[in-house]
Image: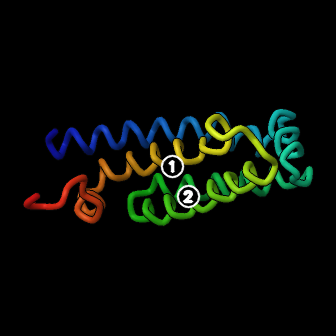
Amino acid sequence: MTARQMTVAGWVLTGLFALFMLGASITPKLLGMDAATQTLAGLGWQPGSALMIGGFELAFLLLYLFPRTSVLGAVLMTALIGGAMATHIRVGSPLFSHTLFGIYLSLFMWGGLWLRLPALRALFPFTAKGA
C-alpha cells in the first residue's frame, strides 16, 4: 500500500471505531438509556455511573479523533477498555464474546491509528528492518 492509501484506510478504521463507540456505548450512557444502565447494573456499577463513564468515553474519543492528541486519546481509551475487561473478568462474563471484546475493539482502534501515523508504524513495525 502507498502511504496515502494507508492513511485513508486508517481514517476509515478510525471513523468506523468512532461510529461504533458513539452508537453502541457513548450515546446510550449519556442519554441514560435502559440498555446502558441495566447492563452496568448487572456488572455491579452504581446507577449514576453511566453518565460519568459515557463522559469519559466521549472525551477520550474526541482526543483520539484530533490528530495532535490522537495517541493520548488512544492510550486513555485503552485504559478505560482495560477497566471494562477487568469488570467482565470479575463478574465471570463469557471470555470470547464479552471479556475479550475490549481487545478486539482496541486492536481496531490502534490499527486505525497505526495506519494513519507513519511515526507509529516506525515505532511498531510488523517486521524488523533488514530481516
Which label number is shown at residue 106? 1
Answer yes or no: do the residues labelled 2 and 1 have beta carbons within 8 Å? yes
Residue drawn at x 38%, y 47% is 111
Residue drawn at x 51%, y 63% is 75
Residue drawn at x 59%, y 47% is 102
> Label 2 neighbourhood size at 10 Å, few (<14), some (14-19), many (20+)?
many
- Nearest to the observer: residue 93 or residue 122: 93
Which amino acid, by three-letter code, is at mark 2? Thr
- Say if 119 sits above or below 2 in the image: below
Residue 72 position in % (x across, y down)? 48, 66
- Nearest to the observer: residue 91 or residue 58: 91
Which amino acid, by three-letter code, is at mark 1? Ser
Task: Judge from the rendering whether residue 85 lies leftward or rightward of residue 74; answer left or right.
Answer: right
Pointer 2 or 1: first along the chain: 2
Residue 85 position in % (x across, y down)? 67, 52
Residue drawn at x 21%, y 38% is 5
Task: Judge from the rendering whether residue 79 lies leftward or rightward of residue 108; answer left or right.
Answer: right
Read off the residue under disc 2.
78
Q: Secondary structure at mark 1?
A: helix
